[in-house]
Amino acid sequence: MKRNIRVMATGLVAVLALAGCSMDSDSEPKSKGSKNDTTTGAAAGGPVEDLTVGFVAVNLNSPSINGIKDQFVEAAEAKGWEVEVFDGQGDQAATNNAASDFISRGVDVIVNNSSPNAQMTGVMKEAKAAGIPFVSIYGGFVEGVDAEIGTNEFINSALMTAEMVNRLEGKGRVVKLNWTVLQALRDRDAGFKAVVSENPGIEVVREIEVKVPGQVEDSYDQLTNILQADKNIDAIWLGWDELAPSAVRAIKEAGLEDKVFAVGFDGNSFAWDLIREGSPYKMEPANPFPLMGGKAIETIETIVGGGTLPSKVVYMKPCLVNEQTVPAEGEEPDWENCAFFPGDIS
């Protein structure tokens, strides 16, 4: 039986950080499951208590995805919400089935952590029919999503790929590794291709679709074979930084640590260790995973509490992590004030 949601009466006067603060004068707080008018800016709803959340993740073996889950659960439980987590372990069908089960059991909200939303449209239809909001973190916006929280990976990839090209002074031979199942990784792929298409001096020697699960071993094996056979590679582009230790190991074993460098994405501490120690892994945009759980909670409160969002897509700011900006061991970037472009580094 679905718990009652107690929405405390507050004026719709608070504003979300990403937008202005107006609603139509005749607007009333929406009931749970209604479609909010998002054309007039953002207005926060009332505080929400006693919420039950069905939280599904495509693969909690990923450090980034698991980190998002930890932050979300911590923030939700601090509000007294009940969260039940399902780990798909890389199985999208099992993830969808678990979400459908949560809906049939009458949870108040479904949260998708990093599963491709394009593969969950059936779940969204079930949620809509049941009046249950569908909120996504890193799933990619599609019709049926009530809110998508993440970073703009087209921009992240364009920046990182351009920085790679700049370090090569516009000429070089590059290997790309990615797994284009997740929407964020497809967006990164598109950003890579857009930048490379404008730089004819860059030769993409190989584009590797990494096997998942088994990405660490597969990336190492494939890079080892390439670098042992071809010593004229200049840079390696990695779709996410879980592949960075494998890339560094393969580069060093090929004796190319003074010639080949790698770039990647996400923002995990093991990748920052590699940057800090001066390895061939040089830079990445670090996504604010520690803040995403809280942003998802804030967004759910707005939707369920009767407020409005300026857009169903909520982008957050990354931080550029390179040799100059890498945080000290055990520390996080200054998420609010960090540099994103190299020219912002003081």
Image (cartoon, helix red, strand yellow):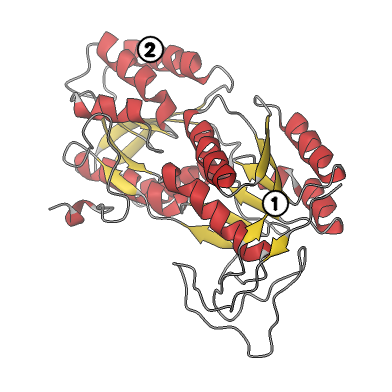
Q: Position of residue 107 (x, y in %)?
A: 78, 47
Left/right of residue 149 with respect to residue 166 in the rendered view: right
Q: How busy is the neighbourhood of tag 1: few (under 14 within 10 Å), some, or many (20 plus)?
A: some
Label 2 secondary element:
helix
According to the image, label 1 marks what residue? 50
Q: Is residue 202 above or below residue 39?
A: above
Q: Nearer the viewer, residue 333 or 216?
A: 333
Hey, which quadrant is residue 271 in on the image? top left
For badge 1, the amino acid type reads: Asp
Q: Nearer the viewer, residue 329 or 193?
A: 329
Q: Which mark is residue 124?
A: none
User: Separation of disc 1 and disc 2 at Cα?
Assistant: 52 Å
Q: Nearer the viewer, residue 207 or 14?
A: 14
Judge whether residue 254 can be spotted in this image.
no
Going 58% across and 43% down the picture, which residue do you hit?
A: 77
According to the image, label 2 marks what residue? 224
Label 1 secondary element:
loop
Q: Count every numbered label the image shows and give the total.
A: 2
Q: Position of residue 242 (x, y in %)?
A: 43, 26
For badge 2, the amino acid type reads: Thr
Q: Position of residue 186 (x, y in %)?
A: 54, 43
Going 43% across and 51% down the picture, which residue do you hit?
A: 194
Left/right of residue 97 with respect to residue 174 in the rendered view: right
Left/right of residue 254 with respect to residue 89 in the rendered view: left
Going 51% across and 39% down the picture, which residue do you hit?
A: 68
Judge whether residue 129 can be spotted in this image.
yes
Q: How busy is the neighbourhood of tag 2: few (under 14 within 10 Å), some, or many (20 plus)?
A: many
Going 55% across and 74% down the picture, which residue do you hit?
A: 42
Q: Is residue 198 above or below residue 283?
A: below
